[in-house]
Amino acid sequence: MLNKKRSRESGEIDGSSLADIAFLLLIFFLVVTTIDIDTGIGLVLPPIPDDIEPPPVRERNLMNILVNAQGMVLINEEPAAIPTVRERVREFVDNNGADPDLSETPDDAIVSIKTDRRTPYNVYIDMLDEVMGAYEELRNQASMDRFGVPFSLSGTTTVPNGKRYTDMYPKTNFNC
Amino acid sequence: MLKLSILRKLRKSALVSYIYIGPERLGGGQLGETSVQIDDGLIEEMGEIRNIMYDKLMEEPRLIVSLRVDQDSEFGIITDVQQELRHAGTLRINYSTRRQL
């Protein structure tokens, strides 16, 4: 008699909240998950030259950046700090012939980055980031002047004279 | 804008080939020599890269090579890989970074 009563008492576990818990977990993971987006600095390597002499470059159109094994930077034979590189590149590219030591036009401007074999990779990336950032700023500025929107947001890539921003400030840096 | 959206589309599809450069992982959490890995295979000799990448380029002419390099690497090995990529004709590269701007 007593035994029978006790076995009847053990009821089921209430399952109605299971859906709530599952839903909560689902939302939790949706919020927490990061989608792995590839970010990075894209560039195009120069092709292997077919025994053709590279065209002569006037010295004023060439900006030499050297990074040594200790991660120290030389710009045109003078020591420089990495955070100042962006400003230097901007001045150099956007000179338009004003200063006789800097580039004639953005088209002609060449930024050369040379590294030692033992240069730390992260220093090189910081360096490249600065140079690319300088070009990005110049393009944005050109876009702002014409349309009042940044380059990345403007719906068009062409400026009134038919040139693209990317052509106005072509990225012509290479490394050896 | 147009260019950007195209690039973003490319990223989604299988146009990106990864090259990993960094110290080899040995047993017991030890790190070995710096080596190069394309997709799943370790590269024994630098000269192989040229052929592998050339084959990939023939399959997919719009190939983008993403270089995923260990932060503490030295630049010399990357220069070697770049030289090989130039020989292979895969000129569009991307240095993968995780840093916030």
Image (cartoon, coloured by chain):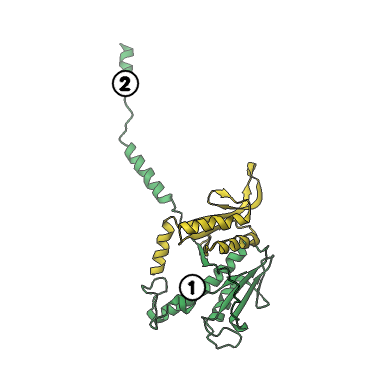
Chain colours: A green, B yellow
- The residue beneath circle 2 is A9
Callout 2: SS: helix
Residue A19 falls in image quadrant: top left
Where residue A170 appears, x then y in whole percent?
50, 76
For residue B97, above or below residue A111: above
Q: Nearer the viewer, residue A5 or A94?
A: A94
Q: Residue at 38%, 82% (x, y): give it.
A: A160
| Label number found at residue A136 | 1
Where residue B32 appears, x then y in whole percent?
66, 48
Position of B4 with respect to B99 (left or right) is: left
Where residue B33 appears, x then y in whole percent?
66, 51
| Label number found at residue A92 | none
Q: Nearer the viewer, residue A8 or A166?
A: A166
Q: Chain of mark 2?
A: A
Crowding at label 2, few (<14), some or many (≥20) Cα neighbours within 10 Å? few
Label 1 – label 2 distance at C-alpha: 74 Å
